[in-house]
Image: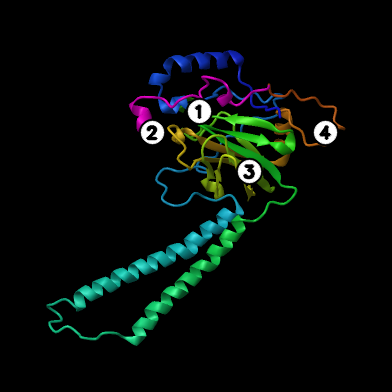
Amino acid sequence: MPRFAFAQDAATTDAATTEATTSEATLDPAEAADGSTEEAAPGAGAYTPMKPTPGKGMPVAGGIGFQDQYSEDGEFALWMHDSILLPLITAISLFVLGLLLWVVMKFRRGANPTPSKTTHNTLIEVVWTLVPVLILVAIAIPSITLLARQYEVPPKDAVTIKVTGYQWYWGYTYPDNGGFEVISNMLTEEEAAARGEPHQLAVDNRMVVPAGVPLRIQTTGADVIHSFAVPSLWFKIDAVPGRVNERLLVIDEPGVYYGQCSELCGARHAYMPITVEALPMAQYRAWVLAQGGSFGDEADSDEEVDAAPLQQPESAIEGAPGAGAPPVGTAATTA
């Protein structure tokens, strides 16, 4: 199956190969994981990467709770946490603290020189058995509901994106649109700042999907176990070599959403970010056509779209930034 990706100049690839071969021993692990960093060249110019909204789909400074959610499952899970779990945890913690302080004060030796010899109390025993059961039932009902929602099967018309985890970058294949593959590597700190994106979360080529429609996300691993996780979409699924996992995802609104590999996958695990860009369907169609993909309904269209040049995943190129042995040195061993 042919694989297409955002274009990267051949001369740049050769230079990167030479540089990686000569400087691997001293290369910082963050720099080694960057891979392709050239500006995306989607062909017809119909696609311009969306600018992220500060605080949306990304971690925020000083944040202590979950990120704002942009999927129905995420909204339900966040409601469950904020409206059920957190109040219960707070109430139980305060009750136990108050009970402990009351016991310390009332039954200390000075206030109670003659201790009680009561062995058991039927009422108390019934209460401390029944109340925890009721609490667990109150938690179980929404928990099972959330679990069932996360196992919902994608409909037949869902848009399929196959996510492949490589050491250490991601590949996104679009089997419904011709089978082209987009290779995604982390940007350097300077490049991320120039684009106005968070460092160690920004990538050169994003996973572009349509917003507001069912997505069938299939994951697999090319080498070791990875985990595709995007917190603001309440989405996490393992990418296991030799196996395809599948899960339904519907993104509520257009935007840029960041995640990371959440399974320890090797020396450069920390430099394997995920950027999901959700577009309105019309813009998504333009993006797919610009990559040389299709929807099966372009027969009546005379418009020609320049396809992105053919590119293999960088792990197939000897000495490429995404391949080879882990960087050596103190920085690599502590990563």
Q: What residue is shown with label 3?
A: 218
**Frontmost residue, 226 versus 86:** 226
Q: Quadrant of the N terminus?
A: top right
Q: Residues within 10 Å of mark 4 (few under 14, many from 20)?
A: few
Q: Residues within 10 Å of mark 1 (few under 14, many from 20)?
A: many
> Residue 187: x, y in percent?
50, 28
Name the dominant secondary structure of the magenta segment.
loop
Label placed on residue 298: 4
Q: Is residue 48 above or below residue 89?
A: above
Say which element carries label 1.
loop
What residue type is disc 1 on? Leu
> Dots 1 and 4: beta carbons under 8 Å?
no
> Residue 288: x, y in percent?
71, 33
- Closer to the N terminus: mark 1 or mark 3? 1
- Closer to the N terminus: mark 3 or mark 2? 3
Which is closer to the viewer, label 1 or label 3?
3
Let me know if residue 82 appears in the view.
yes
Q: For marks 1 and 4, give the CA distance.
A: 35 Å
Q: What residue is shown with label 2?
A: 335
Q: Is residue 153 above or below residue 27?
A: below
Label placed on residue 51: none
Which residue shows up at 51% across the image and 37% down it? 224
- Closer to the N terminus: mark 2 or mark 1? 1
